[in-house]
Image (cartoon, helix red, strand yellow):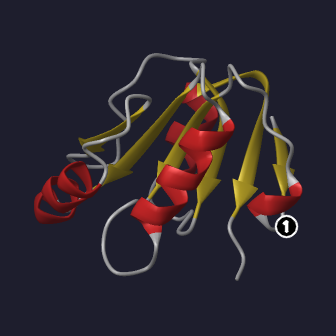
Amino acid sequence: MRTYWLRYKEIKFGEHDRILVFPCGGDDGGVALCRELAAQVPLGLVVGIDPSDDAIRAARYAARDIDNVMFVWMDGPEIPWRDGFFTHAILKDTAPVLDEIHRVLAEGGQLITQLD
């Protein structure tokens, strides 16, 4: 796993990439980020996770017109996904999920921390 401490816009994503975004809800632009990433990976998938059920519901409604993005509620510190699935992970808050990110990232996957 490689870790990048830079802006996600500096990364070139492939059209088949599978990107995890945490957290994805709230007023901090997480849904807009997921929409933007989904456009960059038209044959891939963007998965936003968040511990807030209300944030997930709002995100699902806001992105209901996009086929390759989904939002999943995260109950506790475990990411509800299989090992090695994601090619990239974009984190705004690393503390609660860093071990889980390592588990769900594919071999050679990239961890990108989002900086403003």
Q: In the shown orientation, is residue 91 left or right of residue 73?
A: right
Q: Residue at x 72, y 76 (%)?
A: 115
Residue 19, horizontal then vertical, whole percent? 59, 37
* Quadrant showing the C terminus: bottom right
- What kind of element bears circle 1? loop
Q: Give the number of marks.
A: 1
**Which residue sits at x=79%, y=28%?**
14
- Seen in the picture, residue 81 relative to 94 is either above or below; the reply is above
Q: Nearer the viewer, residue 107 or 33?
A: 33
Q: Amino acid at mark 1?
A: Leu
Residue 35 shown left or right of residue 18 in the figure: left
Q: Residue 67, how many percent across, how many down?
A: 38, 29
In terms of image quadrants, where is residue 110? Answer: top right
**Res 108 → quadrant:** top right
* Callout 1 crowding tier (Cα within 10 Å): few <14, some 14–19, many ≥20: few
Quarter the N terminus occupies: top right
Residue nearest the observer in this picture, 24 or 109: 24
Is the residue 37 above or below the residue 5 in the image? above
Question: What residue is at 65 percent from the left and 32 percent from the top?
Answer: 41
Q: What residue is shown with label 1?
A: 6
Q: Position of residue 105 (x, y in %)?
A: 64, 28
Q: Residue at x 54, y 60 (%)?
A: 33
Question: Residue 6 at what x, y percent from top left?
Answer: 85, 67
- Identify the residue at the far front of this view: 65
**Closest to the observer: 51 or 8?**
8
